[in-house]
C-alpha cells in the first residue's frame, strides 16, 4: 500500500493560513483603498484553503497511522514480526523505534525458541534416564522402595509390593498409608531425619508372610538434594534382600558339619579303641586279635563309605560331578545289582524275587551312578528285613506316559508314617529302627540326588509298620 505524505500538505496549510492572515490584516489597514475588498476576499479564500489543507493533512496522518496499526494487527495474527516501512518523515522516529523493538523482540523470540528446544531435549533425556532407572529398579529381584523428602513413596518394584503386601498403583502417597509394616516406616523416617547423605544403614528385619516369617536384610541410604549442594537428603532408598534361604542354607551347612563330625567320630573312636587294645597287648591269642582286626576293618570300611557318600552328594549338589548319559536298559542294571546283593541276602536267608520283563526298554542315564542308586536301595532293604524275609525287585513300564518305574519291595520292619517325609534327607535315620542296623543316613539321600538332580526323575516310598516298605523311582523312556 502506497503511503501518502502528510508533511507537505501540512506546510501548505500553514503557508495558506499565514497568507490569509496577512491579506486580512492588509485589508483592515487599507480599508479605504479600492483594493481592500479584493484583499479581504483573498484572505477568506486563503483561510478556507488553509483549513482544507489542515483537514487533508490530518486525514493523511490518520490514514498512515491506521495502515501502521493494520500492519501490527497482521503481525499479531500471523505471529511473524516484520519491519514497518518508513514512508513519512514525520513518522520516521516512531517507526524507527517500533522497528528496533521488533528487531529486539525477534531476537528474543529466536533465543527463546532455541532455549525451548534445548529444554525439550533435556526433558526427553531426563525422561529416558528416569524410565531407564525405573526399568532397572523394576527388574531387580530385591524389594526396592524410593521415598522423597516428605516421606512419600515415589517408586517401588513388584518385589517390594509382594514383600510388604501393597499395590503398586498406590505410589505418590505417604508411606504410612501404603505400608503396613511400622518397623520399615520407622527405619525410613529415621534415615531421612538423620540428615546424612553419605553412608548407609544395614538392618536385619523379619516380616510375617502367611504362617511363616521371612528374614530380610534392609539397606537404607539417603539421596542427596542437588539444589541444596548435596548437603540435605532429598529422599531415601530402601532395599530389602530376602535372606531366608541363605539363613536356611547356612543352618543346613552347620547341621551338615555337625552330623559329619558325629558320624566320623563314631567309627574313628572304635578304630582308636581297638588299636589301643592291640597296642596294650589285650589280644592274648590269635582269635581275639583277628576279631579286633575284623572290627577295625569293618569300621574303616564304614568310614570309607561315609566319606564316599559325602563326596558324591557334595559333587552332585555343586554340579562338579561328571555325568555320562547314554541310552541304557534299566533291566540290565537291575539284574547286575541283584547278582551283587544276592550273597548278602543269603546270609539272612532272604529270598529275592525278580520281576524284570525281558522287553528291552531304554532310558537316558549315567550307568554307574544309577547302578549305585539301585544297589543302595537293595542294600537298605536287606539290612532292615529280618531273617527269612523276601525282597521283590520289579520294573513297570508306562508306555502311554513314556515312563519306566523301578521299585524294591521288602517284608521288613516298615517305617512309621511320621518318618516317611524325611527318609531321603541327609543323615536322617528312623529312630525306631536305628538298633536293627548300622548306617550313616546318607544312602537314601544319595539315591534322591542321583535320580532327581542328575536324571530329573522322581523317588518315592510307601511303607507300613510290621509289613514292609517299597522304595522306587521313575525315569523317562527314550
Image (tube, helix red, strand yellow):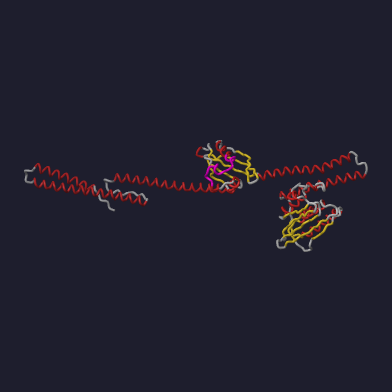
> Magenta stretch?
170-185
- Which sits in the foreground, 191 or 22? 191
The picture places residue 367, in percent across and down from the top left corner, at 77, 56
Residue 282: x and y in percent read: 90, 40
- Among all residues in the image, which is located at the extreme right? 285
* 130 relative to 73 in the view: left or right: right
For the residue pair 340 and 58, the one nearer the viewer reads as 340
- x and y percent of residue 332 in the render? 79, 59
Residue 333 magenta-highlighted: no
**Which quarter of the figure is the C terminus placed in?**
bottom right
Looking at the rendered structure, the number of numbered marks drawn on it comes to 0
| Rendered location of residue 118, percent (x, y) | 46, 47
In this rendering, is residue 203 above or below 467? above
Q: Is residue 365 visible?
A: yes
Residue furthest out toward the bottom: 359
Q: Which residue is found at the position 19% from the left and 45% from the top?
A: 14
**Which residue is nearer to you in this view: 194 or 26?**
194
Amino acid at each position: 500500500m502506497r503511503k501518502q505524505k502528510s508533511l507537505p500538505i501540512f506546510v501548505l496549510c500553514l503557508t495558506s493560513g499565514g497568507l490569509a492572515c496577512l491579506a486580512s490584516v492588509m485589508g483592515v489597514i487599507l480599508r479605504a483603498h479600492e483594493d481592500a475588498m479584493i484583499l479581504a476576499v483573498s484572505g477568506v479564500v486563503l483561510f478556507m484553503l488553509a483549513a482544507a489543507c489542515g483537514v487533508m493533512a490530518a486525514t493523511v496522518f490518520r490514514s498512515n497511522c491506521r495502515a501502521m496499526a493494520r500492519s501490527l494487527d497482521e503481525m499479531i495474527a500471523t505471529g511473524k514480526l516484520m519491519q514497518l516501512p518508513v514512508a513519512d518523515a514525520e513518522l520516521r522516529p516512531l517507526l524507527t523505534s517500533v522497528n528496533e523493538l521488533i528487531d529486539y523482540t525477534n531476537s528474543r523470540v529466536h533465543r527463546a525458541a532455541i532455549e525451548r528446544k534445548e529444554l525439550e531435549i533435556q526433558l526427553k533425556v531426563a525422561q529416558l534416564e528416569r524410565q531407564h532407572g525405573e526399568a532397572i529398579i523394576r527388574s531387580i529381584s530385591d524389594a526396592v522402595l524410593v521415598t522423597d523428602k516428605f516421606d512419600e513413596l515415589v517408586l517401588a518394584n513388584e518385589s517390594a509390593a509382594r514383600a510388604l503386601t501393597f499395590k503398586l498403583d498406590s505410589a505418590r502417597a505417604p508411606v504410612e498409608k501404603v505400608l503396613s509394616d511400622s518397623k520399615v516406616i520407622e527405619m525410613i523416617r529415621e534415615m531421612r531425619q538423620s540428615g546424612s547423605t553419605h553412608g548407609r544403614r544395614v538392618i536385619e528385619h523379619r516380616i510375617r508372610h502367611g504362617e511363616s516369617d521371612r528374614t530380610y536384610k534392609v539397606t537404607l541410604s539417603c539421596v542427596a538434594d542437588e539444589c541444596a549442594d548435596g548437603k540435605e537428603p532429598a529422599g531415601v532408598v530402601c532395599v530389602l534382600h530376602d535372606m531366608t534361604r541363605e539363613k536356611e542354607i547356612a543352618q543346613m551347612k552347620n547341621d551338615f558339619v555337625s552330623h559329619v563330625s558325629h558320624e566320623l567320630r563314631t567309627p574313628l573312636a572304635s578304630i582308636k579303641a581297638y588299636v589301643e587294645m592291640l597296642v596294650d597287648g589285650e589280644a592274648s591269642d590269635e582269635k581275639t586279635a583277628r576279631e579286633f582286626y575284623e572290627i577295625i576293618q569293618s569300621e574303616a570300611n564304614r568310614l570309607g563309605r561315609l566319606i564316599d557318600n559325602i563326596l558324591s552328594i557334595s559333587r552332585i549338589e555343586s554340579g562338579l560331578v561328571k555325568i555320562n548319559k547314554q541310552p541304557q536298559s534299566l533291566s540290565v542294571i537291575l539284574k547286575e545289582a541283584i547278582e551283587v546283593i544276592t550273597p548278602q541276602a543269603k546270609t539272612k536267608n532272604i529270598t529275592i524275587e525278580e520281576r524284570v520283563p525281558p522287553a528291552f526298554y531304554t532310558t537316558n542315564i549315567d550307568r554307574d551312578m544309577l547302578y549305585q542308586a539301585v544297589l543302595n536301595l537293595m542294600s537298605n532293604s536287606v539290612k532292615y528285613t529280618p531273617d527269612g524275609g523276601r525282597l521283590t525287585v520289579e520294573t513297570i513300564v508306562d508306555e502311554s506316559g513314556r515312563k519306566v518305574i523301578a521299585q524294591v519291595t521288602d517284608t521288613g520292619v516298615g517305617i512309621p508314617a511320621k518318618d516317611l517325609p524325611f527318609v531321603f534327607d541327609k543323615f536322617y535315620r528312623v529312630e525306631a529302627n536305628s538298633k536293627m542296623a548300622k548306617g550313616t543316613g546318607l544312602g537314601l539321600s544319595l539315591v534322591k540326588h542321583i535320580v532327581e538332580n542328575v536324571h530329573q526323575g522322581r523317588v518315592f516310598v510307601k511303607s507300613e509298620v510290621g509289613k514292609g516298605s517299597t522304595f522306587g523311582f521313575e525315569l523317562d523312556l527314550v
